[in-house]
Image: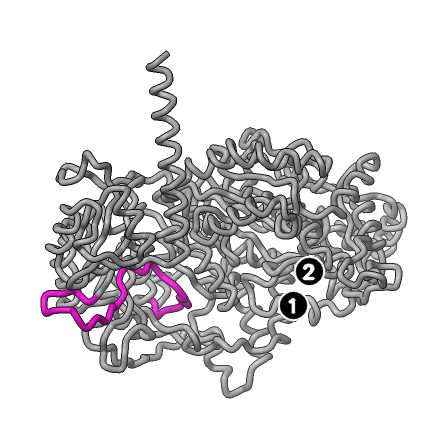
Amino acid sequence: MGRGRRHRGSTSKRNQIENSNDDNVRKPLKSEASFDSNNLQKPICSNLHFEEYYKEQRIVKAQEWDSFMEFLRKPLPAAFRVYSNGQFCDEIRLKLENDFMISLQAEAIESGELEAIKPLPWYPKNLAWHSNFSRKEIRKNQTLERFHEFLKLETEVGNMTRQESVSMVPPLFLDVHPDHFVLDMCAAPGSKTFQLLEIIHESSEPGSLPNGMVVANDVDYKRSNLLIHQTKRTCTTNLMVTNNEGQHFPSCNTKRTLSVASETNPHPIDQLLFDRVLCDVPCSGDGTLRKAPDIWRRWNSGSGNGLHSLQVVLAMRGLSLLKVGGRMVYSTCSMNPIEDEAVVAEILRTCGCSVELVDVSDKLPELIRRPGLTKWKVHDRGGWYRSYKDVPKSQRDGVLRSMFPSGKSDKDSSGGKNSYEEMASISSDESAEEVCDLPLELCMRILPHDQNTGGFFIAVLHKVSPLPDFQEKVTQKRNLSTRNNINSSEKSSSYEAVSDTVVTKPEEGTEEIVLEATVSENGFEPPEMESTCDEGIVELAQKLDDIEGKREVPSMQGKWKGLYPVVFLRDQTVINGIKTFYGIKDESFPLYGHLVTRNSDISSHGNVKRIYYVSKAVKNVLELNFAVGKPLKISSVGLKMFEKQSAKECEANCCSFRITSEGLPVILPYMTKQILYATMADFKNLLQQKSIKFLDFIHPQIGEKAAELALGSCVMVLVDVSQLGSEQFKVNSSTIAIGCWKGKASLTVMVTTVDCHQLIQRLSDRSKEKEKAENCFKTAETA
């Protein structure tokens, strides 16, 4: 079990491994990886069982084995990505190319490397970079201190994100468009979600919000907070973060939910389906050995076996939520075929002709990857098994037929033979190895020694037609299993849709999203999971039920304890006050119906503290969620646009809601009031001084304009001296602006210290570059 992400998308993943496969999970033997007694901080990177397992699976040729193991034992080089939609994207990329690539070269040569840092050749536009130094070396090496500080600052302000290079691959194969609805099923810590949002915004029209959205789901509320922080700097109105179990993620189908609201108020969408689904499932994580060497000590084959069932169910749920014609990427950070090819094979067998693997061999040609396996074995405490018929019945609790290449059960294998003929067949075929007849070579396996990365597995799936109609049998089986695990008094509501009215009294000026709820055992509508009457998937569903029956009840049950309901802001006084104060025309940037808040942001007196803006797509999904009884556990939605600012000097015509730093880039193009244009000198001076009196501006006319602004929140926009006083200036993606507060005699910056420091540094670099260019031009002119 490799990294933190292995516990995403479903409740109690650790319990699922420990409780469901006690027979399969061995305690590490003395011969396995252990810690060096002389240095307790440094693990020994070896595990005899790991080596035996992967040699037997033949994921690499014999002549490559030593190189494969050598790279696995090395620390993972640091990798990072430049935010493509950031204001300073080009400048950061040039600094990497023209500064650090050169200045760090000596250190690289001393370490025996050809290059210190280099762009990943397969990532578009040189936006992703690979360092030949590990993260520890970058932190500890004094020579790399300037580079380390650069990475820290740019990451903190959101211009850059640190991310393992192989983790950047799955979103690139999704082929996301700006109008797509995208689901990231197991999203925390959020690096891939960040990428998906980048792609949606990058390809949309400048100055307009994309028509699509990303739903980032993770069952762990605490980990989703990290996801929210990670994506905060994208300044997006097109994100919704949810805390549902991935295998139970609701489709919010109004046709299946008895709701008066859905009948009387038809919505733009009647079901939550997605154009793209990223199913990056919880896994054993042995592809991350280089950055999490403690896995060496804990690794055993039972981890992968224990997660196989969950991975199949998660992938099947992802496909059921996918629109016909849509694309899903299934990925793991495991090299284990039981978690990789075996899962994909089971998906294809279950879905028949409705789902197919996509050949993406012509995409990202510089990315070195290997085709998926078509042959593998299954290992358990009883040893190695070539086919399901070899597995003793006592072991079939932990070894499923779906783990094998053919996916055949005893019945399928015997082909109608009597017991004597079957035993003879088993004896004669004892050395035969199963081969999967599905095109698994279209899957991709990325191995560490090919390009100095971690390990990863990716499969791209296309939904050709609706999935087979196989819901009923498995639903009955899951219901029976679930009912066996609850008290008899609760049986009547187990996975049966029971209409129950939840009466809540919304605060004045707000409209509660949830007025009517569908109650079931888990507090929401039963999963409309498309499954199969095929013996295999029923077996897997039964296995998952057994696992779930043993787990502890999570704390966030019932009405989503700890998650406050989202409410639409309907207070016309507040909305009209914001529109008038900032000069926003509703037709160009509609506020009504797009502003939301949370109950936690409403004071006991009914005053709203924070207001979030949501795109049209997110608005439609919120309304759909309301119509079907709030099955989505929403932990974050939209972009924080306005925040209550208490100021004694606010007058009657002063708007008490200031524009937030993250909301400013979105709303600025639509503002016609409370804007102050300033030159570089005054702009930098304000950042450095934090507060300046109107009389102290370098350019007096700027101070005069500042004095004319209404008291309260305003925006300072950086312009060239020649543009000062011009009303023809148009805001675009490269415009630099900061939020300020206009007092009676001074202007105060409303930006964090870190943001101020980063902006000052960036403007200084820009001034130097401009001066250098002017000098070069003068020299050329003189010559």
- The local crowd at label 1, few if under 14, some if 14 to 19, many if 20 or more residues have their Cα within 10 Å, is some
> For residue 646: magenta?
yes
Q: Which residues are magenta?
A: 628-656
What residue sits 42% from the left and 42% below the top?
Answer: 199
Neighbourhood count class around disc 2 (C-alpha, 10 Å): few under 14, some 14–19, many 20 upward: many
Image quadrant in which you'd find residue 304 = bottom right
Q: Tag 1's secondary structure?
A: helix
Residue ID at (55%, 39%): 129
Q: Which mark is residue 1?
A: 2
- For the point 67% across and 58% down, the residue is 2
The amino acid type, in three-letter code, at marker 2 is: Met
Q: In the picture, residue 389 is in which quadrant? A: bottom right
Q: Is residue 408 left or right of residue 274?
A: right
- Comparing 594 with 662, the one in front is 662
Q: Which residue is mark 1?
A: 14
- Quadrant occupied by the C terminus: top left
**Depth check, front residue: 431 or 245:** 245
Residue 572 drawn at (x, y percent): 14, 66
Quadrant in the rendering for residue 353: top right
Q: Nearer the viewer, residue 177 or 589?
A: 589
Q: Residue at horizontal 81%, vertical 56%? A: 44
The relative height of residue 626 versus residue 142 in the rendered view (above or below) is below
Q: Secondary structure at mark 2?
A: loop
The percent coordinates of residue 331 (x first, y second) are 59, 48
Disc 1 marks a residue whose amino acid type is Arg
